Image (spheres, rainbow, N blue to C red):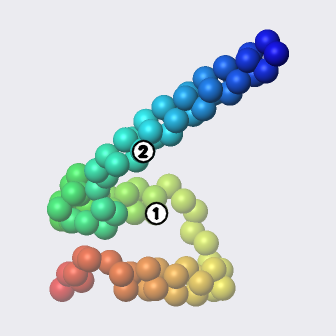
Amino acid sequence: MTWNKTLSSTLKRSLLLMTLMTSSLQVVSEESLPELGDTSSSAISLDSEYRLGRLYMAQLRRSLPDLQDPIVQDYTEHLIYRVGEYSQLQEED
């Protein structure tokens, strides 16, 4: 009989602990996170992002060797054009 009481007590404690843990997880998940792609929650402006991207690409181009592979070039260009369709940046004239 004491074994059943011990098991019952252990199960009750485990159930209470799991209930407390899941309720704390719900509180954490309800914190407000910024929307991805939402410009109002951006850490930097679109102009700053554009300039930073240009600086990064210039540095990358200086540090990498030139690759003259037409298949890789074609794949990369098509991929960039597909991604670029969803960009919020406007083309500079």
- Local SS, label 1: helix
Is 82 placed above or below 37 here? below
Residue 5 % position (x, y): 73, 17
Residue at x 25%, y 76% (from the top left corner): 89
Asked which quadrant contains residue 66, the reply is bottom right
Q: Distance between the residues labelled 2 and 1?
A: 46 Å
* Label 2 secondary element: helix
Residue 25 in view here: yes
Residue pointed to by mark 2: 26
Q: Are marks 2 and 1 in contact (CB under 8 Å)?
A: no
Per the image, the residue denoted by label 1 is 61
Q: Indicate which disc, 2 or 1, sits on the residue closer to the N terminus.
A: 2
Q: Is residue 30 left or right of residue 60?
A: left
Q: Residue at x 37, y 57 (%)?
A: 56
**Residue drawn at point x = 46 percent, y = 58 percent:** 60
Instruction: Using residue 27 as the reference point, say whether residue 38 is left or right of it.
Output: left
